[in-house]
Amino acid sequence: MILVGIDIGKNKHTFSIIDKNSGEILLSPSDFSNNLKGFLFLIQKLSSYTKSELLIGMEDTGHYHFALLKYLLDRRYTVALINPTTTDLTRKLQGGITKNDPLDSLTICDVISSNHRNKPYRVTTLNRFDLYEQKQLTRHHHNLKEELNTYKNRLQKCIDIVFPEFNSLFHSKY
C-alpha cells in the first residue's frame, strides 16, 4: 500500500508519499496550492500509482480541507480523515517537538499506516461528505433562526420601553 500524507493549510498544502511495506519515502514533502492548479499537480504526482493501492490521509481541520477532499472523492480516491489531535499526539510520541508542514505530512503517513484494530482515522466517502455538507447547512439555518429570534426579542424590548401601547394598536410589530 502507498500512503499519502497531506498537511492542510489555508493557501497551500504539503504532501509526502511513503511505501507502507518498506517505510521508504517515495516522494519527499512537497507543497501545492489550495486551488485547481495545485490539485492537478497532486493528481499528476499520484498518477504513477493505481487508485486501489493509495490511501490518502489528511487532517480534518476546519474548512480548509473541503475543496481538496471533494476534489479527491469526486475522482474516486480513498481518503482518510484524521483528528488533528491524533497527529499532534503521534508527533510528540515520536519525540518531535517542532511542528512544521513537511514533518506533519510524514506524521500523517505514520498515523494512517496504523495496524491497530481501532484505526485512528476514518475513511470518508462522497455520500458521507454530502451528508456533512447537509448537516452544516442545517446547523447554519438553525443558528440564523436563533439569531433572528434574538433580534426580535431586542426589538420587543425597545418597543416595550418606548411605546408600550404599540402591541395593542398594531396587528404585528414587524
Image (tube, rainbow, N blue to C red):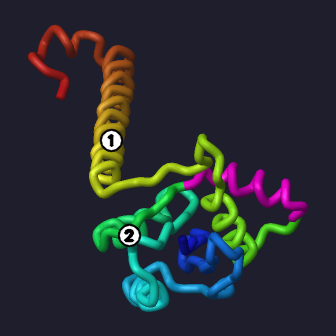
Q: Count neighbours of disc 1 (C-alpha within 10 A) and say few if under 14, some if 14 to 19, many if 20 or more.
A: few
Q: Residue at x 60, y 71 (%)?
A: 5
Q: Is residue 150 magenta?
A: no
Q: Quadrant of residue 92?
A: bottom right
Q: Residue at x 50, y 49 (%)?
A: 122
Q: Count neighbours of disc 2 (C-alpha within 10 A) and say few if under 14, some if 14 to 19, many if 20 or more.
A: many
Q: Is residue 90 magenta?
A: yes
Rendered image: mark on residue 77: 2
Q: Quadrant of the C terminus?
A: top left
Range drawn in magenta: 82-96
Q: Amino acid at mark 2?
A: Tyr
- Percent coordinates x, y for residue 126 in the rendering: 30, 57
Left or right: residue 105 versus residue 45 is right
Left or right: residue 77 versus residue 122 is left
Whichever of callouts 1 and 2 sits on the residue coming sooner in the sequence is 2
Secondary element under disc 1, as helix, strand or loop, is: helix
The secondary structure that most of the magenta stretch takes on is helix
The residue pinned by badge 1 equals 135
- Percent coordinates x, y for residue 28 in the rendering: 68, 87
Q: Residue at x 35, y 38 (%)?
A: 139
